[in-house]
Amino acid sequence: MFYIHCPYCDEYRDEEEFHPKGQAHIARPEDPETCSDEEWGDYLFFRDNPRGIHHELWVHAIGCRKFFNITRNSASYEILETYRMGERPRFSAEHPQGESAEHGAAVNVADEAGRVADQEGVRA
Amino acid sequence: MSQSNQPNRLRQGGRIDRARTLGFTFNGKRYQGHAGDTLASALLANGVDVVNRSFKYSRPRGIVAAGAEEPNALVQLGSTEAAQVPNVRATQQALFEGLTAQSTNGWPNVQRDVMSLVGKLGGRFMPPGFYYKTFMAPASMWMTYEKVIRKGAGLGRSPMENDPDSYDHLNQHCDLLVVGAGPAGLAAALTAARAGARVILCDEQEEMGGSLLASRERLDDQPAAEWAERVIDELAENDKVTLLPRTTANGYHDHHFVTLHERRTEHLGETAPRVDGHRSSRSRMHRVRAGQVLLATGAHERPLVYGNNDVPGNLVAGAVSTYIRRYGVVPGNKLVLSVSNDHAYRAALDWDEAGREVVAIVDARRHPDGELVEQARARGIRIIEGSAVLEAKGDKRVSGARVATIDAAAFKVTGQAELLECDTIASSGGYSPVIHLASHTGARPTWDEEILGFVPSLVRGVHAAGSARGVHDLAEGLADGAAKASEALAALGKSASAIEPPRAETIREGEACALYQVPHEKPTLRAPKQFVDMQNDVTAAAIELATREGFESIEHVKRYTAMGFGTDQGKLGNINGMAIAARCLGRSIPEVGTTVFRPNYTPVTFGAIVGRHCRELFDPERYTALHQWHVENGAEFEDVGQWKRPWYFPRKVNGKLETMDEAVARESLAVRSGVGILDASTLGKIDIQGPDAREFLGRVYTNKWAKLAPGRVRYGLMCKDDGMLMDDGTTSCLGENHFLMTTTTGGAAGVMEWLELWHQTEWPELQVTFTSVTDHWATMTVTGPDARKLLSEITDIDLDREQFKFMDWRNGKVADVPARVFRISFTGELAYEINVQANYAMHVWKTLFEHGKKYDLTPYGTETMHVLRAEKGLIIAGQDTDGSVTPEDLGMFWAIGYDKPFSWIGKRALTRPDTARKDRKQFVGLKPVDPKVVLEEGAHIVVDKDQPIPMDMLGHVTSSYYSPNLESGFALAVIKGGRDRMGEKLHVPMPDGQAHEVEVVSPVFIDPKGERQHV
Amino acid sequence: MSDITYGQVATFNTHPEAAIPSESPLSVAFNQISVSTPAPAVNHASGVRLEEKAFLGHLILRGGAIVLDEAVRKVLGISLPLGLALDESGERSVQWLSPDEWLVIVPGGEEFEVEQRLRDALGDAHYAIVDASGGQTLVSLEGEKARELLMKSTSYDVHPSNFPVGKAVSVVFAKSSLILRRPAEDRYELVLRRSFADYLYRWILDAGAEYGIGVQR
């Protein structure tokens, strides 16, 4: 059972409090009406299934009910980071050791100041 | 005292309490043992040789080991039916007064056994795959064969009565979990505890201390067990340390989640005793989330694989030492010890000190020269060098050992065999680190040629210390435990100052040699059986045969031979089996590799897995605020998700309780002709506020929300972006920026998450909030022609049909309680949904019944609700739809806002080629030609009932009921191109060969113009 | 009419003026509908004591922290916390639920007035207040075995080093979920959803049986 750091609660919680919601960073096309059938089909049905680093969308369903992203190694199940909506991952297939902090906004453990600032809501 | 009853019990020594004698029964015979015994040590003390019959060949078997790795001594515990526990290892079961056990295998008994006929006569004809090859044809008979074979072979049985005991779970957290309380584990726990860390130390044995409890070595010039006791005392004093003896770490799951199975009362009696009048749990699953995990799980000694090595009296060497030193039991009189290493010499020294005869030590090495070898020589024990036991003699007990010089590397016997008379053969082929938990992490172990064993690969945060990683020397193991604990703490950002490990004498040991299967004069396939896995009766010959038949992967060899498939998971045999496979394939052991160990390490009872999540606590039962009334008024309940909803309310008619059909007929007629009431509190309710609430609704619903005015209600369809319906419900405009959305009962949580998903990930710029108010409001639906009359008696709301129209809502008081009343209908009749704060619901409900008596107000349940809505062609999302149905398929064009400015969820998909197909399944009604027929839900619909199978299937029945109002069965269905088939006659074939003729009709069976709900 | 429209949002006082009998979520158990025996009484040997604080006012606040903080301080005299904060009387509390969500609990019947005052204080800001009083109930657990009972029920780490006074979390509890908070050294509070309350109560009673759990009525 995973142990997941919720970037909003700023705590590790058991997997049973979370729901996985599939691949992260799947944006709905800006104007669906101008999408070709193929483009719309890609958006609806096609997902990556890499062995290795993968970005996933999860929700802290029993908890703060906020959605966030996880960078996870699908082979070792190691979670490399969790990050909030609107943030970029530090770890990726291109950067398995992690980009330097200036490049990626995500941090493993959110600091208190950041958390208070975010009390404005998740509209970031 | 009763020494004379226990021929193999030593007068002194061991950690048993000779002052406390315990009586027990094994296979119907009474014996005595002592407090501190295991069932195995007590059986050995009493000279019981045969404890079981083997699974496949039905050969007599004795105790081989002293711990979790024991393959043979599986017993069925329990003196009563309810107390039965199968497959308990006698080596891990503490003795208690009155313990009653039976051999697991052996039907009808272990001494004289039906299956031995098959075993003796058919033995050589039972190669691997025997059962498959013999019994698979005809396939249909396998189940029958299997029953007979299983009964003959036996694998224990579960009780046929309820277990009187309870089991529970405890969630634990710690900085460091230390598995194993031997020397390395104790040193590790002590290091972490002194550093102030939260520590859990668990150990599967009755007593903590591991090898120290039976060690020859002294620590700080005192018996090693005394150091262990001092450390355990110190740990027990520390309130940040949790000590769990009798607790097996059975599974490592992800992210340092480890399940520990604590046997809390198994050592006290058959059932858990009462403490302070309360019965505590028999066993407990600790669900541990650890910061770091340290595995100090020790090693299992490998027996040598030689002919007839399964005859009772063959043991692993270390077990002999354990029985003598820890339990004061010497399991025989004349010992032959066959070894490949120095460490195992301890068994001969202990045997000698117990005052019994060591016939010889047979050492596979040409020139053994370690300190223990010297000690044995000094005592005058005969050492036969460069040799091994080829074969044991004897049937129900070892009577001799055939010994010869061998060339291990060439796998050849090189000398003349000598027969040594003995009753016990102990063997040691080396030590395999217990790597099971490390394997559970998914990390493959690696072969270490120096220690001749697999050592664990470790994922981040998991550490191994001592014998568990091949550090077998006592002094080194102690230091290793302390060092690894410091490393683990450092990984948590905690520093630990080094503890001073006790002084341990170092015994110089000579180099061990690699020996797994001992060669025999005859080729393996014709030699006496050389057992690798005793629990599953897998021999060296079977493995050789498997490789000859073309199985090269060790995973395939394992599955073909069933090696390691027993409840012991091959703890003793697997490495030997891999070595044999490697020899046969001409490869090295690391090339062949190891199989994967999976949880659980030892069997866990279902009780401990389930914990308290059983019977009335199996699953949450959700109640509405009116639940008590429903119970008191005889409702039958239906599970809807976790909700308990009244299904129907049977009345007593002429002293007899109505059937469901009778009750539903009565309830349905009452609603259409008078007035009925339904508890609709389970519907999901979501409060939506914010300036962009209306915009948001327009995006998630298919229909239009721009102009819905406060005071009005609208029905909405919600799709996924693939255009398929996911949920439906009404949403009311409470204020310009305020809405109350309802969802289906089962869809409530999913819809809530859906709304949050879109808001949080796609449209965070919209100012809107969603809050569940499902539990806050109780909802009562009063419906039927008399609904207005009834409600008007107890409300101040103006119910005039022009003032309070269909699809309006109003505030007011009902039965003096502030209420929101919604004029919406799921029955097609005049209906009011009364919402009040749940704490006041019972008063309102009862008041309605007080006033409703004169209208014969009839409570109805979900079944009648289904009939009534289906008569109106109203769908239930999830019943009439299944994730493949669009609003267009449902014919709900009126609820699709094609010209809304925002491309709402699901819209784009409606023009995809597949979604726009003309022959999609469309929602229709079905009327059976025979009105008595009620179609089966899920049944398929065809044009030609006489078409040969496979028939062309047009669609299926989604809802079907008998309608007392129509006096006919009727159904809803989805049928290809259904809307163009109105009036067509189709068929619904049934499994019994008959086919029901049906007519395709409109799904609205009653009041197609909708006049009744507008009255 | 009990309805007042604040700008574009409808509010609703759910309480009747007349004295009307009311039923708490635990009434089904207390009336022995879902359990066959009366609630065990508290005695000197009770290792856990349970008490329902029924009919309190529960409000859900949604919005930005800075905006809400000012209003909450003005109306309740409590600063918006990251965990759990109580007023001086201990009768009113505010609890963090998520970055834009707080739970306010006040004495029963006060919630409508508190809502009005908060709305007055919040003016035109984007926020939401939702009355949830009928949908949940508060239960307190005390006693030396209370923590162990929680350990049987939730995977959340309730050790004092991780769950000190003033902390509040939403967690999985048995097979349901609840809000778990620690208002004082010797007391835990559970906020149960109405429909799950009976199951959770029966679970707690079962888990507490070996500690001689008693129910304060």
Image (cartoon, rainbow, N blue to C red):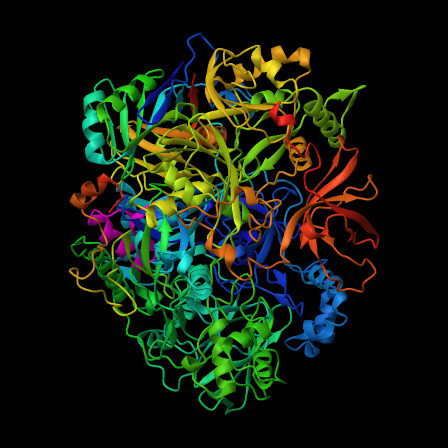
Foreground of the two, B194 or B1004: B1004
Q: Looking at the picture, tell me which residue is in the foreground, B530 or C131.
A: C131
Please state if B808 lies on the left or on the right of C183 as rendered.
Answer: right
Q: Can residue B346 be seen in this view?
A: yes
Q: Split into 4 quadrants, where in the image is the C terminus of chain B?
A: top right
Residue located at (63% from left, 76% from top): B128
Q: Which residue lies furthest to the front in this view?
A: B899
- Please check the rendered image and state whether residue B178 is part of the magenta-colored stretch, yes or no: yes
Q: Is residue B737 above or below residue B28?
A: above
Tell me which segment is drawn in magenta: B173-199
Q: Horizontal and vertical percent for residue B125?
A: 70, 78
Looking at the picture, tell me which residue is in the foreground, B113 or B422.
Answer: B113
Depicted C195 relative to depicted B329: above or below: above
Residue in front for this viewpoint, B316 or B663:
B663
Q: Position of residue B204 (x, y in %)?
A: 42, 53
Tell me if I can see residue B753 in this picture. Answer: no
Determine whether, in the image, residue B532 is placed left or right of residue B654. left
> Does the magenta segment cover residue B272?
no
Residue A74, image x, y percentages: 38, 64
Q: Is residue B409 above or below residue B286?
A: below
The reply, left or right, for residue B897 in relation to residue C78 is right
